[in-house]
């Protein structure tokens, strides 16, 4: 089989990543894009791109018809589905083949067998692969699920059989919680997968997630490309992955690898797949599911094996034999991947939207790889997964690789959107992670300590911010003078910048509701900067050609990148990032709130539950409402102690970003 022209039925970083390998192999690439992605990187990177419909994924990236039409119209002879979207849709895989095209992935039947967690467990049990104790039967009545949960013994985990991405999954610690958990898991499963079949498993205490990368060809050969440890998860979703798994003995590695290869062979698998296991104490491991596609975290495997998994996929899809035998594969060094999301850890990791005003990832090298599908200036909307990029690092051993991860995270500059970068940095710096003493519940247990709290910027950061504001004023005055009809007017004086009588200027920086007063005194060529708390610094500053601020504070030279957007300043300096708002007296007066308040929808979504009614007294943090947005449930909590004055939405209602959901009277 030939593949001369490949359509990538996906978007974002994975589309870009596939395009790069295809191009290197001399294959023409066809991207697809929705209305929301007209200017997206993946669409401009491909040799050609086809519009496939409106922004909602169900009408574009999930539309089998639209994707097949794009393939036909563009003359593509193969389709790579990436991950997510149609990648695990067996009917799509079949339809691609039926249309006379090559599907870069497993046959529809293998996908069907593994696509259902329940069905795959029945198959794995037959193939002798160890399973977590559980129930994956067809009797889906509440009574049957309750009976089985009691038999298995609490705590149990309710899962959506068609599940993925942690959706529809509920931990239940006692019988009383079961009914509510079943109902909410069914709701989420139905909304996400259109299938509310559930299964029940023993909830293992503190396991590690270790998964095996497998590859099979059409000749019936299969190999494993070692493992990835994905134990760092937040609510059962991977956050940081690594390869190889720390402390896995070569013997256990081989046993898990062979079990995974047996799993793949049991369903006639072809192409790239991942067999996921939970690893308990000692050498115990249990199958949980197989993902029949390329995984988000595949780059860590590429870093330690030196293989390009997308190239392997394309070669296998062309009917070639596996590029290497098991004996020819070896692993070297250690790799980590961190998933960088547009989300707000302080707001229960709510997806964040907005424009990327400034984006500067760390420099790529043999040690640092960035897989991303976005550019500075891009708008991150509500329609798709909020992952911005994957940061992948490699080094000779785990501790060196971890140091690389820490410094690359610290040097990752994003302004305009709230991201999880601060959270990732805290995770990467945690001593338990350094000692690889983490299990799948670690992040959820440690969550409070890992969420970056409001941190007052240190004095020297405030000084850098003040210097940047002053230089900007000077620059602005100069530019005004240059463009003025009277360039020598004293009103354009740039030095000392329009000082008041005793040659000082007050600047107020607001951070998380606190004001920091910085007073700058002019002394000819230098400044004295009075900081909150009484300290004082002597300072000089200049602007480097790249826009960075170079300052000397009390004889110490510092370099900072300061991104200013209206009154918002983001200071990148000393390996940290600090955000503040430059005080504007007019805005303050307008902001003085009346007593009471209201709660607005943080993003567009559907109200699924309402817990309160007008007149109810509520306390700070009390759950008030549940909104389903991006197929996940978000609980809206009381922002103050107060009395509910008005509830504006009922279950089933659609709320838009910024709609007032509930109004309060303050107590
Ligand atoms: P999904 O397909 O939604 O990602 P998985 O079945 O792959 O769901 O499980 C995701 C994660 O949930 C696992 O990596 C693990 O952290 C946790 N998990 C799943 N099953 C169990 C279990 N039986 N006991 C404890 N944790 C589990």
Image (cartoon, rainbow, N blue to C red):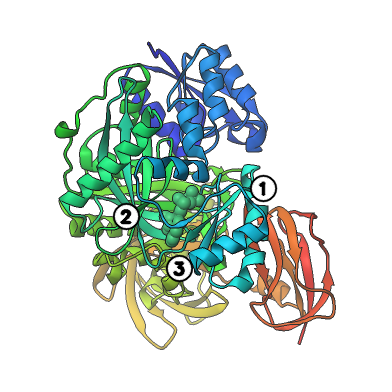
Tell me which numbered mark, 1 or 2, is placed earlier along the sequence.
1
- Quarter of image, res 447: bottom left
Q: Are marks 3 and 2 in contact (CB under 8 Å)?
A: no
Q: Residue at x 55, y 63 (%)?
A: 149
Quadrant in which the C terminus appears: bottom right
- Please name whichever residue, 193 or 22, is drawn nearer the observer in this view of the structure: 193
Q: Position of residue 52 (x, y in %)?
A: 62, 25
**Where does ligand 1 appear, by image quarter?**
bottom left
From this viewpoint, is residue 543 visible? no
- Disc number lying in front (1 or 2): 2
- Disc number lying in front (3 or 2): 2
The residues tagged by marks 3 and 1 sit, at their Cα atoms, a distance apart of 25 Å
Question: Any mark on residue 191, and which?
Answer: 1
Identify residue for label 2.
285
Tell me which numbered mark, 3 or 1, is placed earlier along the sequence.
1
User: Dot 2 lies on which element?
Assistant: strand
Category of crowding for the residue at label 2, using alpha-carbon neighbours closer than 10 angstroms: few (below 14), some (14–19), many (at least 20):
many
Q: Specify whether 237 is left or right of 538.
A: right
Quadrant in which the N terminus appears: top left
Q: Are marks 3 and 1 in contact (CB under 8 Å)?
A: no
Identify residue for label 3.
444
- Quarter of image, res 332: top left
């Amino acid at each position: 089989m030939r593949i001369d022209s490949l359509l990538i039925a996906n978007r974002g970083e994975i589309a870009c990543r596939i395009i790069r390998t295809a191009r290197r192999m001399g294959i023409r690439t066809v991207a697809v894009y929705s209305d929301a992605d007209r200017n997206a990187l993946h669409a401009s990177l491909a040799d050609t791109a086809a519009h496939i419909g409106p922004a909602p994924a169900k009408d574009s990236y999930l539309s089998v018809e639209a994707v097949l039409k794009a393939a036909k119209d563009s003359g593509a002879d193969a389709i790579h589905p990436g991950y997510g979207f149609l990648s695990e849709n067996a009917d799509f895989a079949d339809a691609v083949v039926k249309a006379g095209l090559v599907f870069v992935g497993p046959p529809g039947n293998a996908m069907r067998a593994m696509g259902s967690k329940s069905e795959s467990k029945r198959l794995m049990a037959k193939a002798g692969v160890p399973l977590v104790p559980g129930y994956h039967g067809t009797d889906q009545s509440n009574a049957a699920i309750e009976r089985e949960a009691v038999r298995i013994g609490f705590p149990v985990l309710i899962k959506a059989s068609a599940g993925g991405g942690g959706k529809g999954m509920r931990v239940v610690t006692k019988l009383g919680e079961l009914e509510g958990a079943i109902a909410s898991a069914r709701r989420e499963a139905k909304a996400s997968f259109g299938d509310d079949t559930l299964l029940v498993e023993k909830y293992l205490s503190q396991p590690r997630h270790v998964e095996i990368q497998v590859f099979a060809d059409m000749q019936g050969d299969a190999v494993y490309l070692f493992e990835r440890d994905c134990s760092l998860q937040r609510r059962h979703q991977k956050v940081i992955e690594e390869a190889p798994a720390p402390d896995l003995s070569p013997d256990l590695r081989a046993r898990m690898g062979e079990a995974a290869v047996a799993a793949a062979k049991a369903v006639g698998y072809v192409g790239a797949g991942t067999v996921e296991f939970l690893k308990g104490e000692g050498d115990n491991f249990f199958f949980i599911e197989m993902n029949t596609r390329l995984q988000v975290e595949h780059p860590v495997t590429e870093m330690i094996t030196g293989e390009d998994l997308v190239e392997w996929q394309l070669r296998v899809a062309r009917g070639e034999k596996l590029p290497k035998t098991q004996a020819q594969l070896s692993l070297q060094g250690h790799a980590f991947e961190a998933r960088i999301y547009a989300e707000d850890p302080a707001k229960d990791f709510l997806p964040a939207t907005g424009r990327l005003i400034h984006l500067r990832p760390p420099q790529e090298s043999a040690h640092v790889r960035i897989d991303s599908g976005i550019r500075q200036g891009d708008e991150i909307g509500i329609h798709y997964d909020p992952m911005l990029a994957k940061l992948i690092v490699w080094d000779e051993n785990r501790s060196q690789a971890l140091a690389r991860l820490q410094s690359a995270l610290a040097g990752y500059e994003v302004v305009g959107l709230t991201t999880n970068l601060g959270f990732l940095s805290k995770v990467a710096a945690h001593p338990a992670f350094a000692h690889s003493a983490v299990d799948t519940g670690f992040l959820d247990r440690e969550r409070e300590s890992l969420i970056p709290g409001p941190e007052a910027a240190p004095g020297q950061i405030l000084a850098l911010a003040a210097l940047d504001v002053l230089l900007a004023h000077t620059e602005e005055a100069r530019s005004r003078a240059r463009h003025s009809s009277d360039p020598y007017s004293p009103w354009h004086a740039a030095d000392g910048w329009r000082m008041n009588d005793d040659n000082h200027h007050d600047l107020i920086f607001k951070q998380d509701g606190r004001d920091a007063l910085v007073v700058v005194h002019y002394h000819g060529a230098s400044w004295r900067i009075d900081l909150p708390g009484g300290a004082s610094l002597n300072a000089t500053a200049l602007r480097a050609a790249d826009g960075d601020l170079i300052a000397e504070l009390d004889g110490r030279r510092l370099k900072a990148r300061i991104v200013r957007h209206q009154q918002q300043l983001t200071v990148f300096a000393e390996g940290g990032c600090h955000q503040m708002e430059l005080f504007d007296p007019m805005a303050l007066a307008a902001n003085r709130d009346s007593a009471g308040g209201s709660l607005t929808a943080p993003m567009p979504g559907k109200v699924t539950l309402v817990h309160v009614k007008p007149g109810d007294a509520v306390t700070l943090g009390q759950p008030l409402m549940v909104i389903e947005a991006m197929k996940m449930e978000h609980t809206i909590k009381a922002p103050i102690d107060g009395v509910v004055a008005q509830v504006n939405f009922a279950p089933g209602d659609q709320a838009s970003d910024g709609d007032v959901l509930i109004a309060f009277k303050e107590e």
